Image: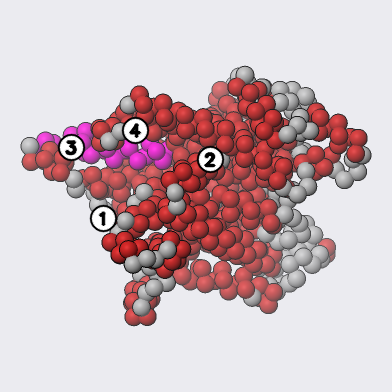
Amino acid sequence: MLAYALQRIALALLICVVAITALISIIHAIPGDPVTIMLGPRATPEMREAKYREMGMDQPVPVQILRFLGKAVIGDLGKDMWSKRPVTVVVAETLPFTLALIAAGLGWAVVLGIPLGCYSAVRRNSAIDKFTGVISVGTISIPSFVVAIYAMLIFAVKLKWFPAIGAGDRGDLADQLHHLVMPAFALGLGWVGYLARIVRASMLEIMGEHHVRTARAFGLRERSIIFRYALRIAILPTITLISLAFGTLLSSAVFTEYIFARPGIGKLVVDAVNFRNYPVVMGAVFITVALFSLGTMLADLLIAKLDPRVRSSL
Amino acid sequence: MSVQASSVVPPVAVAVGAESPSTLRNVWRRLLHERLGLLGLALVALLLFTGIFADWIAPFEPNRINVPDRMQSSSLTHFAGTDQMGRDIFSRIIKGSQIALIVGVSSIAIALVLGLALGMLAGYGPRWLDNCLLLLFDTIYSFPTVMLALTVITLLGVSLKTIMLVVVVSTTPVYARLVRTSTLSLKNSEFILAERSLGAGPVRVMLRHVLPNVVGPLLIIASMDIPSVITLEAGLSFLGLGVPPPAASWGRTLNEGYNLIRDAPWIVVAAGIPLILTTLGFTFLGECLRDMLDPKLRRII
């Protein structure tokens, strides 16, 4: 188990290193350079030269990569091009908003989706099962930004139940939650159906396995079989899925934040792209990649801990 | 989803391309009996039709500015109303299906070919190459797609080519992993060992035996990815970072409608519908085909 954990941690670190190496190499491989894009066509060669030096791009590629990584270790990801504040600070200010949004969106999807999937599997072909089947395909199919816009149109513009933009007043928790409802709804809707489907499929498979049959033969109560013997294993694929969901949810959060004009890492990066604020884009993307590989790593370790079958195969 | 699927592709799967005519006809006949599959087929056919014949179907020139008719809601002349500049939304949406189709189909096709090549290389090639490629795939996979897209756009600027590049970079590893898994399990199967003992080189084995066996399930999975690519393009265009104006991408129309959401709500309503229908169509059709051709995949995806 320890060897596996170390191996998994090494892989996560390696991924971060390769990601940065790839990013910096691509910048050099592509025709045209970010400095020209950043400064515009009217920049003088001297201006470009100065910008190059400021960003450390006059150095050879391997030096740049090592320098970026070395600084990243001590938490220095460079400075915002325009405001000159450290990128780490800028990202740290916006990240909590995004994490809250993702947690809320995924949260309501888990709370609704898993029981729905479990129930559908146990009461197969019941009305609820059929309803869940249709609804899940439907909700998975609607892009989250379309859900967000439609929700805004219906609940904010027409019915005026929820505020359309912003994240609420600082310090006013009720107001912040009120602002969170619609973005979280839009973000999570597709996941309700998706989780329900995965849990249902996984439950159906587990319910047919030997240990469940044995439990039945021993005369255990159905309720205890479902919760203690079947769902416990059926939930495992969901853990992997949720850790992978972080990436997808972060992608959707970019749109949700833009639509509801919420502060967050997605809005930060979109604004940075529009203003050619290259260090912020690099830094923020690096942080999301690091978080994502951390998340998948934790999920893998958790699964190894929970599932005796995986543990023994290590 | 794709990661889940990668570990379970059956070693010898049914190859769609290699079906005999009778089986194809069989699939077709069964498809006609599946209501949802048929609906999916109809929706996909509709997208293809409007995409290919957009210039003939659209009642107005999509970029024609007609100020006197601006901001009209839905009517008999303008089915989906007009925008701030009096452009006909219905025509813009029809034209948008062309952009969606071009981006979706061509970038997935490129990713498919690359994924096949890299996947077979990883599965059949030496161990070190396999490990290097796997690390590369895992790294690309750790980028949230939209973040990857935003990074590439910052570096390359806004254009149709950039979007396609993003799609190719982010989907190739998915296909390559699938192909690698099936190649690995095929590699030691008896018919390939027999072929090799008769003196067949790696190129012949890969092209004649591995390829036909892995291409079938891959085609289905890839065709189910087309809507997510179309959604990505629409999303980036919505952020103003996709296809540059005045092209009538669905995402751009959605963005223009979003800015007018209080005064002209018909624009967002109309621009969202084709995106939903496209995704539904491909999902219904894809699931139906998958169930027919490969029941083993049913539980997984």
Q: Chain of mark 4?
A: A
Q: Are marks 1 and 2 in contact (CB under 8 Å)?
A: no
Q: Chain of mark 2?
A: B
Q: Secondary structure at mark 2?
A: helix
Q: Nearer the viewer, mark 3 or mark 2?
A: 2
CA distance for labels 3 and 1: 20 Å
Q: In the rendering, which numbered label is found on residue B139? A: 2
Q: What is the magenta segment's predominant secondary structure?
A: helix
- Give the residue type at disc 1: Asn
- Give the residue type at disc 3: Ile
CA distance for labels 1 and 4: 31 Å
The residue to which callout 1 is attached is A125
Tell if the residue under mark 3 belongs to the same chain as the one under mark 4.
yes
- Give the residue type at disc 4: Ile
**Measuring 72% from the left and 42% from the top, which residue is drawn there?**
A28
**Measuring 32% from the left and 26% from the top, which residue is drawn there?**
A1
* Residue located farthest toward the left when viewing the structure as drawn: A218
CA distance for labels 3 and 4: 21 Å
Q: Nearer the viewer, mark 1 or mark 2?
A: 2
CA distance for labels 3 and 2: 40 Å
Q: Position of residue A254 (x, y in %)?
A: 61, 40
Q: Earlier in the sequence, mark 1 or mark 4?
A: 1
Q: Earlier in the sequence, mark 3 or mark 1?
A: 1
Q: In the rendering, which numbered label is found on residue A303? A: 4
Residue A79 falls in image quadrant: top right
Q: In the rendering, which numbered label is found on residue A225? A: 3
